[in-house]
Image (tube, grey):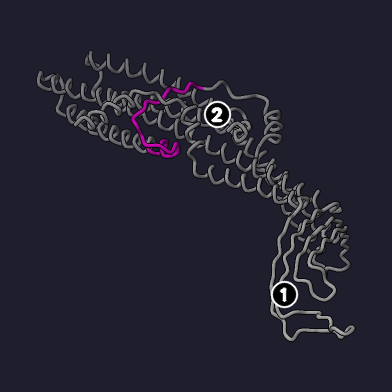
């Protein structure tokens, strides 16, 4: 029993908490499975950089072997034959190798890996911005659905009052039966609208908390204020977006990494210079001592690899061409996207102003219709029509406001404005 009471108290306390947009964004970024995947990709690229640097690191190895050889070999030197081999032989050795100069191999491999890591980091930034945009739009949808529920509840209350008024007038003989039927039909429509609004509110909350990676605890959402007027300098926004959009930066670094891989492939035919020292212990036979230490420089000069390095360099060059084409296409799409979003933002801002004026007119028309109906100048049909028009005007303004906020969210992401500016680096 105590446990049940504790759970109820926790639920009640949680339901009184307020969830802000920034908190929703932070939780979505923290709990996103997609971002977890991209963080692992970036970490993988870091290990690839470490792997590239190992070409210049020393290596230490231990070897041991034993074998049985028959027949043995002896050489008749002097009165006692000298035994060259034995039946049982063993050898234990340890060797140290260190590259001294790789003739470009180390430089180009590490550069290619580091550039690829930068590209993965920008991929993470791009995905994080996408998550931020998605959760912001979901948050706005919840607020919008809540306001629609409030509108539907107000409309239902007005229809209930209208029906009650119609019944009173009908009982007093001041209104025809048709008015009561009309009010009953309007009430049924209002009830249906409220059910639909509540269902949509439930779905949008489920979507938001799913993106946040946590169960819905009944938290109230903080109101989001409208953004300022649309920006006027589209060209400046384009220049900023082309310089900061993470998808473009990722492709740029990928192109540079592919160019470095061309040099990697071409450097495979280069010489290599290294230092090697080894110690070996084995069974002494013939002219071989039991212990032997060897130290020296090793210069390796490839003469012909069968065309492998040339083929790999050709493949890398074609990859560069592909990535350059992808980058140029991405630049074109970003420019087009900015044009579309700019026009959409301006249009939606204008729709908000039009919807506000429409609401003012609808409110005045409804006020006049109520006075006319109360004075017996008009009929119930006229009143219901004007009140329905008022409900639609309120809904139009509601949709226009939240559509404008959604357009601002997309514009901020497209032009890399906070919170979409360098999102991955701030994580």
| Numbered disc in front, either 1 or 2 | 1
Relative image position of residue 342 (x, y in whole percent) = 61, 31
**Element type at mark 2:** helix
The residue that mark 2 highlights is 408
Q: Is residue 60 magenta?
A: no
Residue at 83%, 76% in the rendered image:
286
User: Which residue occupies the extreme front position in the image?
Assistant: 79
Question: Which residue is under mark 1?
Answer: 89
The reply, left or right, for residue 411 in relation to residue 335 is: left
Verify whether residue 217 appears in magenta. Answer: yes
Residue drawn 65% across the image and 39% down it: 246
Above or below for 248 versus 26:
below
Disc 1 and disc 2 in contact, CB within 8 angstroms: no
Q: Tell me which segment is drawn in magenta.
A: 206-226
Q: Nearer the viewer, residue 256 or 350?
A: 256
Q: Is residue 14 above or below residue 133?
A: above
Residue 297 appears at what percent x and percent y? 88, 58
Residue 155 in sight here: no
């Amino acid at each position: 029993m105590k446990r049940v009471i504790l759970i109820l108290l926790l639920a009640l306390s949680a339901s009184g908490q307020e969830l802000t947009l920034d908190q929703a964004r932070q939780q979505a970024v923290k709990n996103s499975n997609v971002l977890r995947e991209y963080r692992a990709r970036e970490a993988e690229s870091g290990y690839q950089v470490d792997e590239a640097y190992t070409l210049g690191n020393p290596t230490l190895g231990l070897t041991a072997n034993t074998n049985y050889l028959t027949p043995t070999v002896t050489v008749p030197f002097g009165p006692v034959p000298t035994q060259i081999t034995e039946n049982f032989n063993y050898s234990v050795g340890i060797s140290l190798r260190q590259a001294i100069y790789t003739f470009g191999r180390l430089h180009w491999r590490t550069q290619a890996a580091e550039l690829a890591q930068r590209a993965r980091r920008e991929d993470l930034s791009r995905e994080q911005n996408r998550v931020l945009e998605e959760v912001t739009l979901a948050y706005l949808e919840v607020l919008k659905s809540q306001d629609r529920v409030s509108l539907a509840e107000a409309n239902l209350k007005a229809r209930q009052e209208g029906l009650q008024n119609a019944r009173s007038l009908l009982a007093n003989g001041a209104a025809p039966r048709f008015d009561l039927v009309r009010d009953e039909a309007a009430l049924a429509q209002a009830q249906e609208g409220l059910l639909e609004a509540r269902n949509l509110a439930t779905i949008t909350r489920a979507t938001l908390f799913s993106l946040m990676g946590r169960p819905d605890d009944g938290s109230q959402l903080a109101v989001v204020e409208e953004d300022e007027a649309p920006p006027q300098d589209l060209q400046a926004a384009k220049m900023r977006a082309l310089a900061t959009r993470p998808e473009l930066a990722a492709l740029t670094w990928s192109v540079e990494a592919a160019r470095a891989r061309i040099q990697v492939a071409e450097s495979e035919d280069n010489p290599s210079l290294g230092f090697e020292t080894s110690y070996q212990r084995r069974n002494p036979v013939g002219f071989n001592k039991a212990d032997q230490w060897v130290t020296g420089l090793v210069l390796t000069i490839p003469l012909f690899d069968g065309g492998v390095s040339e083929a790999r360099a050709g493949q890398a060059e074609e990859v560069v061409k592909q990535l350059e084409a992808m980058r140029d296409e991405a630049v074109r799409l970003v420019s087009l996207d900015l044009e579309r979003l700019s026009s959409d933002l301006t249009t939606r801002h204008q729709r908000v102003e039009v919807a506000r004026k429409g609401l003012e007119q609808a409110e005045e028309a409804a006020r006049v219709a109520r006075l006319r109906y109360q004075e017996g100048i008009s009929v119930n049909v006229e009143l219901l029509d004007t009140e329905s028009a008022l409900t639609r005007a309120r809904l139009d303004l509601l949709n226009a406001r939240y559509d404008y906020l959604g357009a601002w969210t997309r514009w901020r992401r497209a032009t890399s404005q906070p919170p979409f500016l360098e999102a991955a680096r701030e994580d």
